[in-house]
């Protein structure tokens, strides 16, 4: 795709080099050519003093927002500011699951919109993100849970989303490792969403960064935002470790630290910060070809193409900005793993990761304008942010370009809390540590 | 693993307690506005630093405690009864 025009670009624009189109033909040609024809996938830009849009946070949502602004709305005068290096945060360290098996109809529509964008992501980015629709299988262990899951599956079908009920025998056939008659919570059956699956998470960051960079977006690494400058009720730019940057619109896409950034602008958000852990085992031969979730505890697992079993559980349970995780949750998650899949008892855990999440007060994300003009928020992802990256970026870009929410994300506005229109998927109330 | 010094039971492991969130928000009265109730229910300081919070000693005395804990280091520097507050000099950052 040729770079789109940059209406307010300065006379001396930074040099743009295209990484060219990736294809099988190019791979063969470079193979015969000593791999000398490749160039960097995206440009490391230095910040200019003013942009039309400044996006704070170079994670999945920030990069996707920049990509869709540039390619879908022709707004290329955009900077993405990242505090550290690109692709080392939550976007590249999560459990890589994509799915749209939600309960609230508005959420089903939003997450299925995302799933449909995932299905054509690699073609639109010309980047191999290893989107694998291997299916997500949710197990149930009680009759009440069967009723609840049936109701959810019916709600999904009403929205045109795929969901299939599986018997015990079908579960065992799909996942031979499962101990159906485990002593604590015998498995009664499961619900499968065949279109769910996994995506290679770091490729999502690289793919969106490459697409945005080629369209003219400045991606600025090692640029920490230290303040947000206001003139009355309008935000006019950000103070950074590399100087002041003026902007017509500032978009916060810093889930995990949204409260800290909003505080710089004098706003208080309905968000608490909690840590979520993920784990990877040593590589083993193929044993699991779906995403499997346990219904009697919080546990989900899939197998990566390298052979490692990737799994996670619930948040640690109390406010923390510590990006490390604590041992009691390690014990709880591994106990669930061994109850459901006893064969895992002999597998070694290779590494562990803890990342901080925006836990919103109703368990649903926030894509919204704020009480301050020129400040847009993309946050509150509650450890479900990865699967929503394409839809989150798409709808945030729409919000910035049109000044009005995209219909599929209109229910995720910040005003829903005061207005009593919360989107509480689990029905537990304003207790973020329970979502 | 947090070790929380319960004023009634002594120091116990985190596993005996249940987190109950931010303890800095006084409950509005009937005279307050709807916006006050909304801020009480949904607004959170969510600081990166010292945080005053509720913990229920569910596996011990079953009483609520107020705990002042750092949200980055997880250090606990004050624990008290629900009515008590950390001394002002302790509250300074």
Image (cartoon, helix red, strand yellow):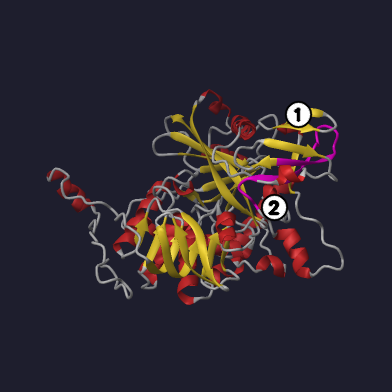
- Tell me residue A236's x, y (percent): 48, 70
Q: Residue at x 77, y 28 (%)?
A: B11
Marks 2/1: CA–CA distance: 37 Å
Residue drawn where x is 84% and y is 40% of the image: B81
Structural crowding at the residue carrying mark 2, measured as other residues with C-alpha within 10 Å and reported as few (<14), some (14–19) or many (≥20): some
Cβ–Cβ under 8 Å for marks 2 and 1: no
Q: Position of residue A334 (x, y in %)?
A: 59, 31
Among the 4 quarters of the image, the one containing residue A405: bottom right
Q: Badge 2 sits on which subunit?
A: A
Considering depth in this image, is A412 or A324 the residue closer to the camera? A324
User: Residue A118, position in %: x, y?
Assistant: 43, 57
Q: Is residue A54 left or right of residue B75?
A: left
Residue at numbered disc 2: A148
Q: In front: mark 2 or mark 1?
A: 1
The magenta stretch spans which residues? Answer: B46-68
Name which residue lies at 58% across and 44% down: A321
Q: Which residue is mark 1?
A: B12
Q: Secondary structure at mark 2?
A: helix
Q: Residue A289's spot in the image, x, y percent?
A: 47, 40
Provide the chain ID for the residue under circle 1.
B
Which quadrant: the N terminus of chain A?
bottom left
Crowdedness of circle 1 by 10 Å Cα count: few (<14), some, many (20+)?
some
């Amino acid at each position: 795709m040729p770079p789109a025009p940059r209406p307010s670009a300065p006379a001396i624009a930074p040099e743009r080099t295209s990484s060219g189109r990736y294809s099988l033909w190019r791979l063969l040609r470079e193979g015969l050519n000593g791999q000398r024809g490749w160039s960097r996938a995206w440009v490391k830009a230095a910040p200019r003093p003013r942009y039309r849009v400044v996006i704070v946070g170079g994670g999945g949502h920030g990069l996707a927002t920049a990509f869709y602004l540039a390619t879908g709305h022709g707004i290329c005068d955009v900077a993405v500011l990242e505090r550290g290096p690109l692709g080392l945060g939550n976007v590249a360290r999560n459990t890589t699951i994509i799915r749209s098996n939600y309960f609230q109809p508005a959420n089903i529509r939003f997450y299925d919109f995302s799933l449909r964008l995932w299905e054509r992501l690699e073609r639109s980015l010309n980047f191999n993100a290893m989107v694998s629709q291997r299916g997500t299988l949710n197990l149930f262990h009680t009759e009440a849970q069967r009723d609840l899951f049936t109701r959810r599956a019916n709600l999904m079908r009403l929205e045109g989303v795929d969901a299939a009920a599986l018997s015990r025998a079908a579960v065992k056939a799909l996942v031979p490792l499962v101990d159906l008659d485990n002593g604590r919570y015998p498995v009664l059956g499961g619900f499968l969403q065949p279109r769910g699956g996994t995506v290679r998470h770091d490729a999502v960051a690289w793919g969106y960064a490459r697409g945005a960079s080629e369209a003219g977006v400045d991606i600025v690494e090692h640029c920490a935002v230290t303040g947000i400058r206001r003139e009355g009720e309008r935000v006019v730019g950000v103070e950074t470790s590399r100087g002041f940057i003026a902007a017509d619109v500032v978009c916060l896409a810093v889930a995990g630290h949204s409260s800290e950034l909003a505080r710089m602008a004098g706003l208080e958000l309905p968000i608490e910060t909690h840590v979520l852990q993920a784990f990877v085992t040593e590589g083993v031969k193929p044993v699991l070809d779906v995403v499997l979730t346990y219904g009697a505890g919080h546990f989900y697992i899939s197998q990566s193409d390298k052979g490692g079993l990737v799994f996670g559980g619930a948040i640690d349970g109390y406010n923390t900005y510590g990006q490390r995780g604590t041992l009691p949750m390690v014990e709880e998650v591994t106990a669930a793993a061994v109850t459901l899949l006893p064969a895992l008892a002999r597998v070694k855990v290779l590494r562990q990761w803890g990342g901080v999440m925006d836990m919103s007060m109703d368990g649903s994300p926030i894509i919204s304008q704020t009480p301050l003009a020129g400040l847009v928020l993309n946050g509150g992802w509650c450890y479900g942010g990865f699967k929503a990256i394409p839809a989150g970026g798409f709808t945030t870009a729409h919000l910035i370009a049109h000044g009005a929410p995209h219909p599929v994300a209109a229910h995720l506005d910040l005003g829903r809390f005061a207005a009593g229109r919360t989107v509480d998927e689990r029905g537990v109330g304003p207790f973020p540590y329970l979502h | 693993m947090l070790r929380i010094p319960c004023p009634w039971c002594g120091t116990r492991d985190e596993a005996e307690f249940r987190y109950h969130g931010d303890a800095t928000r006084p409950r509005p009265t009937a005279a307050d506005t709807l916006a006050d109730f909304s801020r009480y229910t949904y607004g959170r300081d969510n600081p990166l630093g010292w945080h005053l919070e509720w913990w229920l000693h569910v596996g011990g005395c079953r009483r609520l405690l107020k705990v002042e804990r750092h949200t980055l280091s997880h250090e606990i520097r004050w624990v008290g009864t629900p009515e008590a507050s950390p001394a002002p000099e302790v509250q300074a950052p």
